[in-house]
Image (cartoon, rainbow, N blue to C red):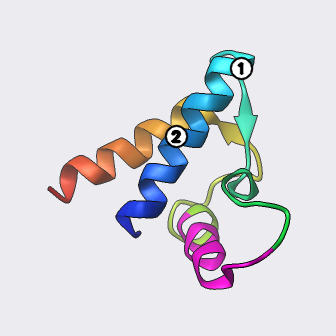
Amino acid sequence: MRRMLQQKIIQVCDTKIAQKGEGVGLSFYAFFANKNDDPELLMEAATWWIMTHKLDHFEKATKIKKMIQTEMDANR
């Protein structure tokens, strides 16, 4: 996954957690505007979420953030 997308996912997770608490759930659509202006990036996130990790539609933001951080650390 592109580093830029990983950073955006962490930012969105942090924002959602700050707004609604550690129990907040989200889907991969939370990382994109309602307008599909970058279908390749959307598919990259969807593939990571659905095909690679077989996640449910909604997952805890804390779980997603931890998964992304682990992948970023592994790729340094």
Q: Is residue 47 above or below residue 62?
A: below
Magenta stretch: give its range.
36-48
Circle 1 SS class:
helix
Which label is found at residue 19?
1
Q: Residue at x 42, y 62 (%)?
A: 4
> In the rendered view of the protein, which quadrant contains the N terminus?
bottom left
Residue 69: percent from left, percent from top: 35, 43
Residue 43 found in image quarter: bottom right
Farthest residue toward the top?
A: 21
Residue annotated with mark 2: 11
Does the magenta segment cover residue 58?
A: no
Relative height, residue 21 to residue 65 (above, below): above
On residue 70, the disc is none
Q: Give the residue type at disc 2.
A: Gln
x and y, in percent, of residue 29 in the image: 75, 58
Question: Which image quarter is the C terminus in?
Answer: bottom left
Q: Is residue 68 left or right of residue 59?
A: left
At horizontal 71% and vertical 60% (from top left) the residue drawn is 32
- For residue 40, which quarter of the picture? bottom right
Q: Is residue 47 above or below residue 20?
A: below
Mark 2 and mark 1 in contact? Answer it, CB < 8 Å. Answer: no
Q: Is residue 73 left or right of residue 9?
A: left
Residue 33 in picture, x, y percent from top left? 77, 60
Q: Nearer the viewer, residue 74 or 56?
A: 74
Q: Amino acid at mark 1?
A: Gln
Image-based side of 11 in relation to 6, left or right: right
